[in-house]
Amino acid sequence: MHGVLLFLHSWMRWIVVVVGVIVVVRAWWGWLGKHPWSSADERWVRLFPILVDIQVVLGILLLMTGRVISPLFNQGMKALAESQTRFWVSEHVIPMLGALVLTHVGYVFARRSESEEAKYRWVAVVFGLAMLIVLVSIPWPFSRVARPFFRFF
C-alpha cells in the first residue's frame, strides 16, 4: 500500500505543478492584459485547489501507511534534529499545508470578486505564492533530500 501511495503522490505532483503553472500564467496574462474572465479561467481556477486537495490527501495517507503510522513518520518523531527526517516531518508537510490553505483562500476571494481584474489579481498573486511554496517544498533530485523526478513501482 505504501509503495502505491508513494507512486501516486510522486506522479500527482506533476499534475499539480503543470496545472498550477497554467493557472498562474493565465491569471497574470489576464490581469496584466486586461482580458475578460472566461469560463475556461473559471474551470482552471476551480481545478487547481481540487488537485492540491487530492495531493495533500495522498500525502497524509502516505504518512499514515505502514504499521498504523509510516516508519518514516515514526522515525521523524524521534529524530527531528536529523536533516532528512526534519525535511519530511516539517519542511515538506507544513509548507504544503500552507499552500493548500492559500489555494482555497485565493479561490474564495477570486470567486467573490466583482471585477474581472480583481479575480485575475487574486489568482495571480495568491496561487502564484502557493506555487512558489510548492516548488520550494518538493524534494527535487538536486536537493539535499534528493528524490527522483519520476517514481516507478
Image (cartoon, grey):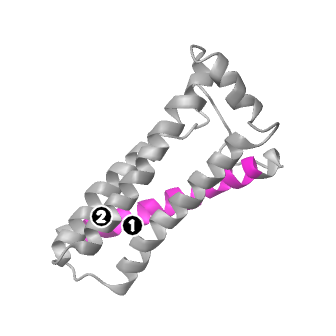
- Residue 125 in percent (x, y) is at 26, 56
Q: In this image, 113 relative to 94: left or right?
A: left
Q: In this image, 27 relative to 103: left or right?
A: left
Q: Nearer the viewer, mark 1 or mark 2?
A: 2
Residue where numbered disc 1 is placed? 23
Figure quadrant of residue 30: bottom left
From what the image shows, is residue 24 above or below residue 86? below
- Residue 54 in percent (x, y) is at 59, 60
From what the image shows, is residue 56 above or below residue 124? above
The three-letter amino acid code for the residue at tag 2 is Val
For the question of whether residue 124 can be seen, the reply is: yes
Please name whichever residue, 102 or 20, is drawn nearer the observer in this view of the structure. Answer: 102
In magenta stretch: residue 140: no
- Residue in the image at 61% along x and 23% along y: 84
From what the image shows, is residue 143 above or below residue 17? above
**Magenta region, mostly helix, strand or loop?**
helix
- Residue in the image at 58% along x and 38% along y: 140
Please name whichever residue, 31 or 64, is drawn nearer the observer in this view of the structure. Answer: 64
- Residue in the image at 58% along x and 30% along y: 89
Marker disc for residue 123: 2
